[in-house]
Image: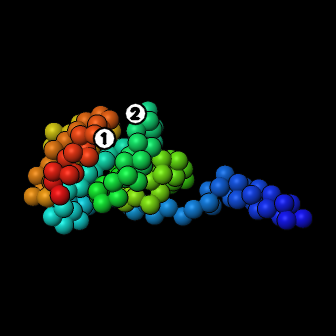
Amino acid sequence: MKTCRLLGVFILCALCFSMGYAQNIDIKPYRQGDWAAVLQSADGKPMAVHIWGVTCAPCMKEMPQWGKFLEKNKKDRAIFLQVDDVSLGMMSKMLMKAHLDHADNYYLVGSFDERLRYEIDPKWHGETPITILIDADGKKSIETGPINFIELARWFSEGS
């Protein structure tokens, strides 16, 4: 009887997960003009802002590595901004799979246009993934493409 009850709970959980009810992930909206607030949230500490897309193959491969990195380096701060025009359900599924469901996650509201890109960095052409490293003094450096997590750990340790 107890085994049947446990099996029933397992099946119910699996159904809820497949329907998107497994976990409520906090994914905040990001609008044009929010970049200043993102920079200010660093509060004098090093921070990485990782811009990614659900439909970006390198992003899909890299996001689980971000999850492992943050699990191992709990004191390091990273913000994730998803820029594809996809549902919150798709984003949530990807973030959960990558173990980033408790990270600081944002999704782009509106179109991914030149003004938004220019606000973040005038030299950025919109390619993903891209990681913007903001040091304790607010100085930015940009890494286009997948990040080297060994160098990222070193950057955080030197900037702390």
Checking the image for residue 149, the label placed there is 1
Mark 1 or mark 2: whose residue is earlier in sequence: 2
- Report x, y in % for residue 66: 38, 46
Quarter holding the C terminus is: bottom left
Instruction: Give the crowd class for mark 2: few <14, some 14-19, many >=20 residues within 10 Å.
Output: some
Q: Is residue 72 above or below residue 125?
A: below
Residue 155 visible at all: yes
Q: Residue at x 41, y 42 (%)?
A: 65
- Report x, y in % for residue 79: 32, 55
- Distance CA(mark 1)–CA(mark 2): 15 Å
Q: Nearer the viewer, residue 133 or 109?
A: 133
Q: Secondary structure at mark 2?
A: helix
Q: Residue at x 15, y 44 (%)?
A: 141
- Report x, y in % for residue 63: 42, 43
State which quadrant residue 34 falls in: bottom left
Residue 31 visible at all: no
Q: Nearer the viewer, residue 30 or 41?
A: 41
Q: Residue at x 16, y 39 (%)?
A: 123
Toward the right, the furthest residue is: 1
Q: Is residue 153 above or below residue 60?
A: below
Q: Is residue 26 above or below residue 78?
A: below
- Report x, y in % for residue 2: 85, 65
Instruction: Give left or right: position of 144 versus 6.
Output: left
Checking the image for residue 58, the label placed there is 2
